[in-house]
Amino acid sequence: MSKDYSQISFRDLQTIIDDFRNKRDELNKKTKEFITGLQEIDSEIFKSLKTARDSHKKKRDFWNKKVKELKKKKIEYKNLHDNLIEETKKLQRSRSNSSIGPKRFISIKQIDRKIDNFERIIETENLEISEENEIVDKISSLAEQKGEQLKAQQDDGYYKLERKIEIVKINLNKIYENLNKWSNKSQDNHTKMLELYQKANDLKDKKKRMEENLIENKKSADNYHEQYIEAMNHKKKRFKNKKPYHPRAKQGSRKTSRPYRKDQSKDRRLMEKMKQDKLAVALEKQKAGKKLNLFEARLILENSRSGS
């Protein structure tokens, strides 16, 4: 609705015009800030999603694959271990039923400890030649016993099975260790991926709120601009008896007015493109029967009113 400025003095009218222009310019400045903020949010969303997909998801999938392969190997070694235990039990039962009986082996470690003790005595004590020769003979005897023991163990089936079981246990322990370590790496990357997805969702919510604020801010700026034009037209009619004022640059102010109009036009185009993109998404969601947010519902309502 047009406002009646006929009863307002020239000075008051100029004050009103200046106020409309200042408020419009301030709101247009905020519009630019909103647009810049939206562009920054889009960049952050893209960066978060890209890092989540290209880095953490790939690493998680890599370690998951390694864990899956290692679990298969764990089953193989576990079955091998159980089979060796069963063979050992069978061999024990076989020897228990025979007249030979199980072989008894002296620990190689015990033999090595005895040899070390004798060698330490020779090095640290003041011995007679006969005493030292006696100890040397004992060391030689123990070394010979060790050799015979090793050969006997290598030829003994029961001992071979025990050695195999020991090796399998070592490998199984290593598998369990790697399973734990690799599972932790997979979980760590999975957690970081989810955190980035959540960050992107939070940024999308922030973007929606900012878009709503942008539309309201732009409407207010347009309203003040219309009032500014109306007041300027009244000023021209009343005091200069000229045609209604239109926001065209004067000869002396061309350098300052053109950039403003150019920036304003660019902002309008950018905002309109963003609006149309959001409208297209909203219409697709509406068609699919998905829930619309306040911003999307408003866009569809405005579009239907305009007859688009």
Image (cartoon, helix red, strand yellow):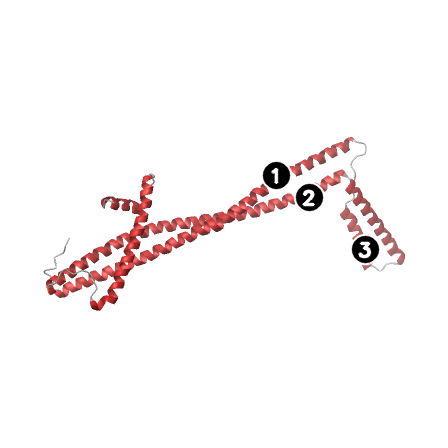
Quote the CA–CA distance across marks 2 and 1: 16 Å
Marks 3, 1: nearer the viewer? 1
* Residue highlighted by disc 2: 167
| Residue 102 placement: quadrant | top right
Residue 263 marker: none
Locate residue 71 relative to residue 223 in the image: left or right. Answer: right
133, 61: nearer the viewer: 61
Residue 75 marker: 1
Residue 119 marker: 3
Vertical side of 287 occupied by 275: above or below: below
Is the C-beta separation of discs 3 and 2 under 8 Å? no
Position of residue 89 measured from the top left corner of the image (x, y, whole percent)? 71, 34
Position of residue 294 measured from the top left corner of the image (x, y, whole percent)? 30, 46
Identify which amino acid the numbered label 1 is placed on. Ile
Position of residue 301 measured from the top left corner of the image (x, y, whole percent)? 26, 44
* Residue found at the very far right of the displayed protein: 130
Q: Residues within 10 Å of mark 1 (few under 14, many from 20)?
A: few
Whichever of labels 3 and 1 marks the residue nearer the N terminus, that label is: 1
Position of residue 247 measured from the top left corner of the image (x, y, whole percent)? 20, 61
Whichever of labels 3 and 2 marks the residue nearer the N terminus, that label is: 3
